[in-house]
Image (cartoon, grey):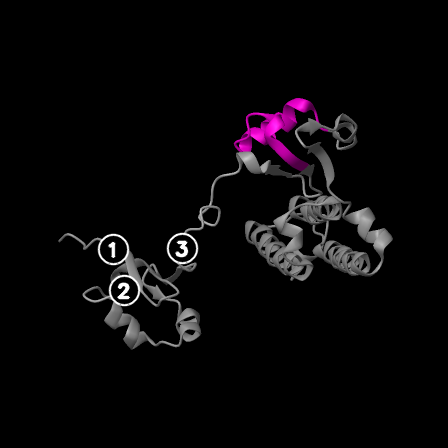
Amino acid sequence: MDFFNGQDSLTVIEWIMRSIVAFIFLIIAAKMMGQRSISGLRFLDFIIALVLGNIIAHPLSDEHLGLKGSIISTFSIVFLYVAAVWLSLKIPFLKHFFDPPAIPLVQDGKLDYRNLLKAKLPIEFLYAELRKSNVEDISKVAFAAWEPGGTLSVFLNTAYQPVTPADLKLTTQPFNLTKPIITDGHTEHALLREIGKDTVWLETEIRPHEINNVILATVDSKLSIQVHVIREPKTP
């Protein structure tokens, strides 16, 4: 465990061991913070990302620094993060501070320039985000808002929205969700249990193919199996 403490010099193996320990530790810390910290960087998430990256990076590049201080500091920061998130759910003021409401930028085709300045966004950036939503004319926008996570939500006026089967009063089929049940020759046993089937049923459904030769197969809500990709046979 000498690599754990500060040293005058570290061997290649000790540097690798530090990297492995730090990598596993960061995975555990990210798991403790939850999906929110990696799905979208809001104000609090951004601060945490900067701090954690800075704390753990130093002992990975300086042999004179031990890992103990970085790990204790990281645990402290993670605890404060979880506490802040929990308190923000209980205290409206903290919720508004950490997760401010969306800022309306366009309403009924008219740009709210004051809110655009509040969001600190140039007009060119707004138009670039509208183009990403396939909107070429701001007058077609019924409502657009800048979200705390740094994304633009856009809603078109009903006259410019795509026609749906419901608008035409057409009968549609129920939603049919497909899930991968075989990936690279491995069976998703949890999915098999979910649909109430076993491996024998799966082998029967994919015949004449064998599970080991199937790269991708999916099952839908009607329990219909589709084999998409088969492993090419090896040439002698």
Q: Residue furthest front?
A: 169
At 72% from the left and 57% from the top, the residue drawn is 71
Q: Earlier in the sequence, mark 1 or mark 3?
A: 3
**Image location (x, y in percent) of residue 18:** 62, 54
The residue tagged 1 is 231
| Side of 233 relative to 113 (left or right) | left
| Side of 227 relative to 13 (left or right) | left
At 55% from the left and 26% from the top, the residue drawn is 136
**Image location (x, y in percent) of residue 185:** 31, 62
The answer to which image quadrant residue 81 occupies is bottom right
Depth check: give the residue in front, 36 or 66: 36
Q: Hey, what amino acid is under mark 1? A: Arg
Q: CA distance from mark 1 to mark 3?
A: 39 Å
At 65% from the left and 44% from the top, the residue drawn is 61
- Please, what secondary structure does the residue beneath circle 3 have? loop
Q: Earlier in the sequence, mark 1 or mark 2?
A: 2
Cβ–Cβ under 8 Å for marks 3 and 2: no
**Image location (x, y in percent) of residue 49:** 70, 46
Q: CA distance from mark 3 to mark 2?
A: 40 Å
Q: Hey, what amino acid is under mark 2? A: Asn
The residue tagged 3 is 171
| Mark 3 Cα-neighbour bin, 10 Å: few <14, some 14–19, many ≥20 | few
**Location of residue 150 with respect to 215 vertically, above or below:** above
In the image, which residues are magenta? Answer: 121-144
**Location of residue 54 with respect to 226 vertically, above or below:** above
Q: CA distance from mark 1 to mark 2?
A: 9 Å
The answer to which image quadrant residue 181 occupies is bottom left
Depth check: give the residue in front, 123 or 87: 123
